[in-house]
Amino acid sequence: MDKILPELGDTSPEICILHINPVTHATQLLIRAPKAIHVRKHWHTANETHTMINGTAVLACEGKRAEIGPGGFNFMPAKMVHEAWLPADSLTFITVDSAWDVNWLEGPPTAADLIH
């Protein structure tokens, strides 16, 4: 796993790319959050799905919030602005139907977004 925010050291969420389709660039990946964190508003070029493996996350978009716990699933259309609150020790399986990217509205999370 690679640190997503290396400046946060051991508290940084980690990412592991599991598979990239060589033709479509559709990507499957895991994100592990060792510490609870608010993932600031962002969007992706591709359609995205989240499946919670461990922990219960809160996802928000268009003024609505939803919790997804272990085994829970959601679909986020391409370019939909969303944010998330990931609990400590959470593991999220994510798919995107083309190349993985993250477009931050107000910059990536910082140490201030860690939830104590």
Image: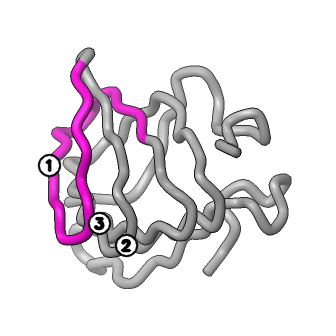
What residue is at 15 percent from the left and 51 percent from the top?
Answer: 74
Q: Amino acid at mark 2?
A: Asn
Query: Which residue is found at the position 34% from the left and 57% from the top?
Result: 56
At x 39% / y 73%, what residue is drawn? 29
Q: Which residue is mark 3?
A: 52
Query: What residue is pinned by disc 2?
Result: 54
Q: Earlier in the sequence, mark 2 or mark 1?
A: 2
**Disc 2 versus disc 1: distance between alpha carbons?**
18 Å
Residue for badge 1: 75
Is disc 3 surrounded by few (<14), some (14 to 19) or many (20+) residues within 10 Å?
Answer: many
Label 2, label 3: how far apart the Cα atoms are? 6 Å
Up the image or down, 39 lies above or below 8; here it is above
Q: Earlier in the sequence, mark 3 or mark 1?
A: 3
- Using the image, determine if residue 2 lies above or below residue 42: below
54 in relation to 76, above or below: below
Region rendered in magenta: 64-84
Q: Nearer the viewer, residue 46 or 111?
A: 111
3D distance between C-alphas at marks 3 and 1: 12 Å
Q: Classify 10 Å Cα crowding around label 2: few (below 14), some (14-19), many (20 and above).
A: some
The quarter of the displayed image where residue 42 is located: top left
Tell me the amino acid under the disc marked 1: Phe
Coordinates of residue 59 in the picture (x, y in percent): 32, 39
Q: In the image, is residue 67 part of the stretch drawn in magenta?
A: yes
The reply to whether residue 6 is in sight is yes
Q: Amino acid at mark 3?
A: Met
- Residue furthest to the front in view is 116
